[in-house]
Image (spheres, rainbow, N blue to C red):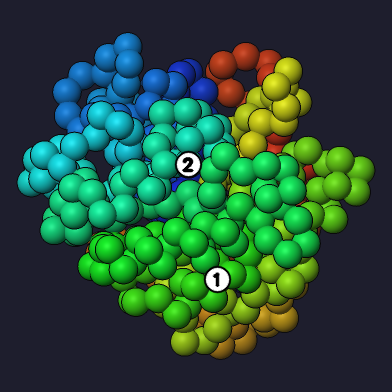
Amino acid sequence: MTLTLPKWFDLHTHFRQGPAMVSYVKAHLDMGCAGALAMPNTQPPVSRVSGAAQSDGWSIESYSAELRATGGQAFEQLIVPLYLTRQTTAAMMREGAASGLLRACKYYPPHGTTNSEHGMPMDDLIGGEVFRAMEECGIVLCIHGEQHALSGPDYIDAQQNAETRFYTERMPRLLAAHPKLRIVCEHITTRTAAEFVASAPEHVGATITPQHLLYTLGHLIQGLKYHLYCLPIVKFQDDRAALRHAVTNGRQTKFFSGTDSAPHTTKATACGCAAGCFTGGYAPQLYAMAFEEAGVDLSTSEGHSLFERFLCLNGPAFYGFPASAQRFQMKKAPSQTPILETPAGPVTPLPLGMGIELTWRIVG
């Protein structure tokens, strides 16, 4: 079986900074990726709209130029969100939108994930001038939807977790205060988040990663497979079932691909496990495997359409640019998880699919 699909867009991924960027960008191009939304939690962060990079931060303009210089000029679309910090102003929103450089902003819960120490609490943004200006200008708010500063038992237990608390306590307030704000709920992991997005207005969408469609907390903990560790953490079977239902619903237009691929060369660190799963080079294969595990027959026209909608069509439609006119092919055939070598040195990013056999391969 061979699938022919429009080239797809990874609308949540990490290319970081430094000499390895060229390898990370190439890995995306090699897997049929036509464009990317590149996360701004670099070191230093992407905290300004225009101008040259400075010691305390990149600008969207300078980081975009760096990505294009490392191979990203081949992308049809390249979106770099602005990292929301305490230095972000409403004037930056209006001026950035008018320049065409600013299309999205990224909310990070303070200290909630990798390089998120520059973030600010959602409560400090709801009802404020920055979100009002984003609303007026049509700028998309990309949200890491977890409540920050929780104790261990509140962070995750059988009844609730940081994500469910965010979507029951913060998101309703956000929508009430900013009813026209375009929002992408990124890398959702729970039934609570999936049902919230499904019932929200049409200008609220969500990305879902391969790992959250494939794995559960049991996969991570059994043997402490730290290559599966990401934030938000993989959840329970009921949550995975809700995510699979969301992406395979024949009427859905709100859920789309965003891998959250993160190239960590060292997972076990002195301060804990680095959060992020690297899927550069083989994300479409993982998504196809997840759809099949969800019961979708990709050999049928209906199954092909469901997969194409999630992987290739819904994201561009939400962000307001056309789907790619170029095509790539995947073949149903065993393959091994590629190990990416980079010019940064002998240490390579630890792949999510370490030790597993893929059931699909990119063939053109």
Left or right of residue 75: residue 266: right
Q: Residue at x 68, y 82 (%)?
A: 297
Instruction: From this view, report whether residue 136 is shown above or below residue 106.
Output: below
| Disc 1 residue crowd, few under 14, some 14–19, many 20+, Cα 10 Å | many
Q: Nearer the viewer, mark 1 or mark 2?
A: 2
Viewer-closest of 336 and 226 = 226
Task: Tell me which amino acid carries mark 2.
Answer: Pro
Residue 212: in sight, yes or no? no
- Rendering quarter of residue 313: bottom left
Left or right of residue 360: residue 117: left
Q: Residue at x 31, y 53 (%)?
A: 126
User: What x and y, as percent, mark residue 178?
Assistant: 26, 63
**Residue labelled with disc 1:** 194
User: What x and y, as percent, mark residue 180?
Assistant: 23, 67
| Disc 2 residue crowd, few under 14, some 14–19, many 20+, Cα 10 Å | many
Please say if the residues under marks 1 and 2 sit with CB atoms less than 8 Å apart: no
How far apart are the two marked residues, 1 and 2, measured between alpha carbons?
A: 20 Å
Report the disc number at residue 109.
Answer: 2
Q: Secondary structure at mark 2?
A: loop
